[in-house]
Each structure stands twice: as C-alpha cells, then as structure tokens.
Image (spheres, rainbow, N blue to C red):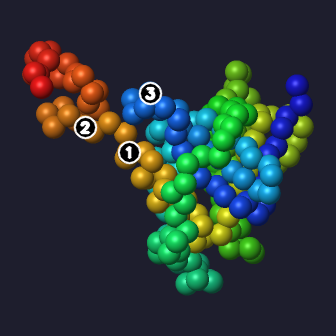
Amino acid sequence: MTRQVFDYAHPDRFVVGTVGMPGERTFFLQVRQGNAVTSVALEKAQVAALAERVDQLLDEATTRPGGETIPAAGVVGSTDSAPLDAPIVEEFRVGAMALGWDEAENRVVIEAHAVTEDDEEIPDIGDDDADGPDTLRVWMTAGYARGFAERARTVVSAGRPPCPFCSQPLDPAGHVCPRANGYRRRS
C-alpha cells in the first residue's frame, strides 16, 4: 500500500478533541484546510506530551535571534473551543510524533506518524519518501501553536476527576481504592 502524507502548510484549523464519555474517550488531532479535513487518533498521554513539547520548543525559540516576536501565551481569541468537525473519519492511529521549528518562516511543524507493525524507521521531518508510515504534517505560526497547546491541556484535564486518596481516575460509580485496602467507599 502506498504511503499517504497529509500535508497542511496553511491550515484553517488544527485542534485536539475527543469523542466519548470521560474514561472512554478517544482523542483526535484534526486539521482542516479549505474543504479537506483529516483526523488521526492518538492516546491521551501523547496529547499531553505534545502540548508540553510545543511550549518547550517555543520557549527555546524565543532565545534565538528573532524570537522576541514569539508570544508567551496564545494570541487572544486564538484558542479554538469548538467541537471537532463532523464526520470524524480516523485516517490512522498515531504511533510516533515529531516536532520542529522552521527558523526561516518562524513556524512550528508537527508530524504524526501512523503505528507500524514492524520496527520501521520513523522518517525525518519533511521526508516524503514512498516507504514509511502514513504521516500527518501540519505547519502553524507560533501564536497559533500556543493556542493549540492551551486547548490540548484543557482537553486532557477535562476527563474524570482524580480520587483524593490514590489519585486514580474516579468513575461515576466510584472505584476500588488501593489506599482503602480494596474496599469501595459508599457514596
């Protein structure tokens, strides 16, 4: 099967969103440019790590020449809080991600690579060789990237609240807390 590279140089929208109830949510990266919409599924931990790394990358870029134009937070009004665009069609499940900074354009590039069955090598950023996993590549400005990271953190934290005793997620019906010696607390 031929490798697909979904390349969005100037996206109208790039967001993290979920489908499902807390505890059973599926996380998606979704990008839209014109009428083209691409959605890829990933894990909650991948979303959290991506948001953290985007902020770290931008903080590091502020120390370089020209970095004074990079905002410390998302541009006011740039945080997208709308739901994912429907219909949501999963193109692939993300295995590895790559993050880069284009100094010439002062833009962030995010690549999400599909899960591979074998120990296939992950391509370098911008590599469009026919061999390799399906890839979603998105370019965005620093201000938009800050807003993307803010939304990603909000989506991750919108799950189930933690147990005050063991910090594991609480289900609506409660849970068996290891700090209570395995006994379920009455609500």
User: Percent from the top left, x then y, of residue 161?
Assistant: 27, 39
Among the 4 quarters of the image, the one containing residue 174: top left
Q: Amino acid type of disc 1?
A: Ala
- Classify 145 as above or below 119: below
* Marks 3,1: beta carbons within 8 A: no
Among the 4 quarters of the image, the one containing residue 173: top left
* Marks 1,2: beta carbons within 8 A: no
Quarter in which the N terminus is drawn? top right
Quarter in which the C terminus is drawn? top left
Task: Tell me the residue that label 3 is attached to.
Answer: 24
- Classify 186 as above or below 138: above
For the residues labelled 3 and 1, the Cα–Cα distance comes to 12 Å
User: Percent from the top left, x then y, of residue 44?
Assistant: 47, 38
Q: Amino acid type of disc 2?
A: Pro
* Marks 3,2: beta carbons within 8 A: no
Using a 10 Å C-alpha cutoff, classify the residue at mark 1 as few (fewer than 14 neighbours), some (14 to 19) or many (20 or more).
Answer: few
Left/right placement of residue 97 relative to residue 174 reads right
Left/right placement of residue 183 relative to residue 139 reads left
User: Which residue occupies the foreground of this view, 142 or 60?
Assistant: 142
Q: Secondary structure at mark 1?
A: loop
Task: Tell me the residue that label 2 is attached to.
Answer: 162
Residue at 60% over, 67% down: 144
Residue at 47% over, 60% down: 150
Using a 10 Å C-alpha cutoff, classify the residue at mark 2 as few (fewer than 14 neighbours), some (14 to 19) or many (20 or more).
Answer: few
Q: Secondary structure at mark 3?
A: loop
Q: Which mark is residue 158?
A: 1
For the residues labelled 1 and 2, the Cα–Cα distance comes to 11 Å
